[in-house]
Amino acid sequence: MNAYKTVQVRSELTDEQANHASFWKDALRLSSLYLICWAAVYLETPIIIRLVVALLLIFIQLYSYYYSSVIVLMALFIPFFSIFFDNAISGITITRLAFATFFIQSLQKQKLRNLQISPSLLFLILISLTTLQISSSYQILFRDMPISSDGSSANSINILAIIYDNLSVILFLYFIFTRLPFNKLTYFINFIILLAILEAISLLFVAIQYPNQVFGTMASEVDRNILWLNPLFGHKNDWSMILVFIFLVAIVRNIYVKDYKLIYYLVLGIVLPTIAISLSRQAYVWCALVFLVVSWLQKDFRFVGYLSIIALLVVLFQPDFILQRIQSMLEVRSVEDFQELNRKVSDLAVEQAINNFTIIPRMFFQDWEYNWSEGFWNGFLHQQGILGLLYTFFLYFYIYRRYDTLSRMKKGSLYYYCIILMTAIMLMFLANFNRRYTHFMHYKGDIGQIGFLVMFLIMYTELVYSAIRRQLPEMLLLK
């Protein structure tokens, strides 16, 4: 009997070591593919080279369903894949091509399990996404709401393309959570973190190429557009915000998961410096909130200590590029000073938000107008009014309460994923006052990186809960 147990333990250790080796091989392949794609776009290679890269990705997808899903994950999560062909091929993107291949494979792939998620939670999220898709389409088609920062508008074909992209995200999540084995889904969390690290490396490389953007007075408008409004990753307040959420996932997992520590050290060594060079005061504030909220939820004040260490390092080394950005925040002495520092809380923005507090949404009797607060809540109010806002408040409260309840079970990985989601919901709620991509869907109708990440984490946490509740042996693979 003892001999049998010894063999069984050795077998489990061998399987675990094999899983680790498999993950790192896949991580290396994913990193290589990312760097090839990023170089093709960043170096502005001819369209023929980009087509060859696209064909390479499709060929890899045909190798296996698992690799196909990894390619789609990368294409959905990294922003520049939507402009990979630089409009040379109208309406065609790598993301759409990769998802089409994945979709056909998914229909042929045997289902391993039903979708493990609370029906009421799934219904509430889908209602939120659907109503936002409808209201944004109405605004774009009939109220001239632009679909991009350059002011361009859309037609019905563009609307269908946006809906296709959003369905790609929803169906991708559905298929991987019903067709991939447990251990591969665990990999995906680390893959998302890895992709964010690679995105951060790309941005650090840009900062080195254009040092005046970060470490000195901006030399030209070109420098400003390269990093602050990056053509591949978006505005600094957008890409820095997703890095804050990745940082949240990494630091909480780092406490409870013994494996893959290297990834979490890379987050500290690469993602945090990238947030610093973003010069986004909002990202600085949200990072501090991550430490404080996690400390409060876990009743573990080590995180406050970590935050204090970071603050101490800033005081000791006094990096000019950070001090110049936060100095104005520290000098605020009145409401007027704060409004001057941040136009998003100006009298004009406050007045617009107050006017949007109507039962019948203002979009039905007023043309689109610029969102002066630049926040989700204000734009959402314009489209769905008070009732829509109350519904979203209820949705956030429902999600928070659900994971607060599940966290009280104190069941290993379920506990820390609940902590992550509770913190994420609080950050989303607060950030929605002056950020637009911190809900499940932008009020213009597209799903961003944060929406994708949070929906993935919700579905994964529900899977963990289902495995624990049903006492499935696979629950040992959920970390």
Image (tube, grey):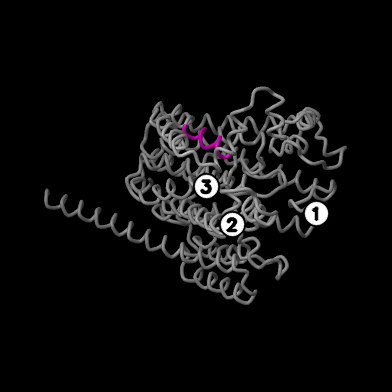
Residue type at numbered disc 1: Ser
Foreground disc of the pair 3, 1? 1
Disc 2 from disc 1: Cα separation: 32 Å
Circles 3 and 1, Cβ within 8 Å, touching? The answer is: no
The residue to which callout 3 is attached is 456
Which region is colored magenta? 283-291
Residue type at numbered disc 2: Tyr
The residue to which callout 1 is attached is 153
Q: Quadrant of residue 296?
A: top left
- Labels in figure, total: 3
Q: Quadrant of residue 435?
A: top right
Residue type at numbered disc 3: Phe
Circles 2 and 1, Cβ within 8 Å, touching? The answer is: no
User: In the depicted view, which residue is nearer to us: 242 or 271?
Assistant: 271
Measured as percent of width and height from the top left, residue 370 is found at 79, 41
In primary-sequence order, the first of circles 2 and 1 is 1
The residue depicted at 69 percent of the width and 37 percent of the height is 375
Task: From the viewer's perspective, tell me whether residue 313 is left or right of residue 220.
Answer: left
Disc 3 from disc 1: Cα separation: 30 Å
In primary-sequence order, the first of circles 3 and 2 is 2
In primary-sequence order, the first of circles 3 and 1 is 1
User: In the depicted view, which residue is nearer to us: 460 or 417?
Assistant: 417
With respect to residue 66, does 118 lie above or below?
A: above
Task: From the viewer's perspective, tell me whether residue 94 is left or right of residue 16.
Answer: right
User: In the depicted view, which residue is nearer to us: 338 or 36?
Assistant: 338
Give the SS element for disc 2. loop
Give the SS element for disc 3. helix
The residue depicted at 52 percent of the width and 29 percent of the height is 401
Circles 3 and 2, Cβ within 8 Å, touching? The answer is: no
Task: From the viewer's perspective, tell me whether residue 237 is left or right of residue 309.
Answer: right
Give the SS element for disc 1. loop
The residue to which callout 2 is attached is 210
